[in-house]
Image: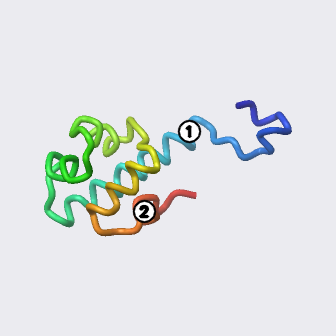
Amino acid sequence: MDCRTEICDGLCLSPEEISLIRETLGNNIRRLRKRRSRTIEELSHMAGIHGTFLGHIELGRRLPSIHTLIRIARVLEVLPAALLAGVR
């Protein structure tokens, strides 16, 4: 959406901002996963998602749906907000 329109009201995210969100989210998930001594395969199985998809999330290549984000947070035993720590 074009941020110069009234509909957007200046709240649109730039591609750079989206990239930073993906990177921060991925880093947080990876850090928390490793802190709990889980592999990508273990976490993805427990969260009910494909391991390749989780790997892409951790690398900042994909963004999960809110539903998937909540499932990952539950498996990691954190609030979903913890996965977005550092995102402004």
Q: Residue 6: percent from the left, percent from the top?
A: 85, 38
Q: Position of residue 39 (x, y in %)?
A: 14, 52
Secondary structure of the residue carrying numbered label 2? helix
Image location of residue 24, percent across then percent down: 42, 52
Q: Amino acid at mark 1?
A: Glu
What residue sits 25% from the left and 46% below the top?
Answer: 48
Query: Residue lying furthest bottom in this view?
Result: 78
- Tell me the quarter of the image containing the C terminus: bottom right
Left or right position of 72 against 37: right
Give neighbour class at mark 2: few <14, some 14-19, many 20+ (Cα, 10 Å): some
Task: Please give left or right for residue 84 compared with residue 47 in the image.
Answer: right
Q: Give the residue at mark 2.
A: 80
Q: Nearer the viewer, mark 1 or mark 2?
A: 2
Q: Is residue 14 above or below residue 24?
A: above
Q: Earlier in the sequence, mark 1 or mark 2?
A: 1
Instruction: Name the residue rendered at 57%, 43% in the picture.
Output: 17
Report how far apart the C-alphas of labels 1 and 2 lie in the structure: 23 Å
Report the residue at 29% width, 37% height from top.
53
Which residue is tagged 1?
A: 16
- Element under label 1? helix
Q: Nearer the viewer, residue 83 or 16?
A: 83
The answer to which quarter of the image holds residue 33 is bottom left
How crowded pointer 1 is (Cα within 10 Å; few <14, some 14-19, many 20+) is rated as few
